[in-house]
Image: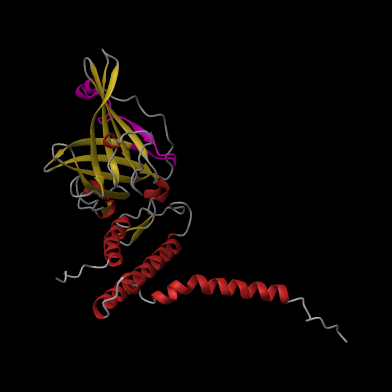
Amino acid sequence: MRLPPHPPTALSSLIFLLPSLAAAISLDCSDIRVDKTAFNLKALGGPHELHKIKEHPSTITDTTITLDICQPLKKSPGIPKDEDCPNGSRVCAIERLTNTVENTTRLSNTIPIAGEYSTSIGGHLDPLWERMKSSSSSADREREGIRLQIGGGKDEDGKKQKAIIEFLCSPNYKYEDPPEVLTAEDEEEGNGEPGGEEVDDEHGGKIKILSWDDEDKFKVLRLEWTTQYACEDAKDKGDGESGGHWGFFTWFILIAFMGVAAYLIFGTWLNYNRYSARGWDLVPHSETIRDIPYIFRDWIRSVINTVQGGGSRGGYSAV
């Protein structure tokens, strides 16, 4: 009995590769365009940690919030997989509980807040940018900067998570020592601002936790990032390179890759269905590709012979 045809392995791999490529370029922090205004936050890339601490009579809860707006967070060396942030995380919180009586610390919870996750962990990053001056809120229109909303995560109870980061313009901001981390008692008594720690972003700005509360169907982490790179007239954006040239080469490589992939997919499909090809014969111009090593070897040999024979006169003397 003849089995039904199966899609070629090479074709399947290319098809599954394309969605991954699209997801990888869904958030480009070096080329942000909102309302025809360009921003470059590439210099703010890299992991940044903030701590939210709550003290109780016999325990201390330390929540470490790590974020990287430019790329997924890297795995921490030596940390078990089930105690680290999931793959694809951009914003993630890890809670640790310290028993002050027994002097022990254990991991309490890992909460993926925003990232590109599998359906079993959460959802998609779905980045959404908003220019402050174009906001419907009159209070926002008086400020300069942009707002980023990203999601995709959920906690162990299934509560969907979301992060909203406000990048506020401050061209002449000077960093000062952050205030002491507030305890639960301080927050309840209204001492200082809620949220906890402010951290330096190493580029003259600061990141601050505004809140992390339930809002409708989501638990929303709100952060405020004061930085010179959120200014619309910033002369030195990102890493100082021209965003236009970088974007041109990026799109050139992307279009070239998509063109080659489309050609290989169509050629493989054609060879499979029209000629019932198998194995290497599925690939377009497979014979030429297999001959490339021999062609390259002959070319190298020809170049070597030309160079070595350039000074020879065939044994004859000049008259």
Along the line of sight, the residue nearer the viewer: 238 or 16: 16
219 sits to left or right of 312: left
Residue stretch in magenta? 184-207
Residue 177 lies, in percent from the top left, at 41, 29
Residue 9 lies, in percent from the top left, at 28, 64
Residue 215 lies, in percent from the top left, at 14, 41
Residue 99 lies, in percent from the top left, at 25, 17
Residue 135 covered by magenta stretch: no
Image point (39%, 74%), residue name: 286
Above or below for 205 versus 196: below
300 sits to left or right of 157: right
Image point (68%, 76%), residue name: 306
In which quadrant of the rendered view does residue 153 lie? Answer: top left
Which residue of the protein is positioned furthest toward the bottom in this rendering? 319
Which residue of the protein is positioned furthest toward the left in this rendering? 216
Above or below for 4 versus 141: below
Image point (52%, 72%), residue name: 294
Above or below for 18 versus 184: below
Along the line of sight, the residue nearer the viewer: 272 or 65: 272
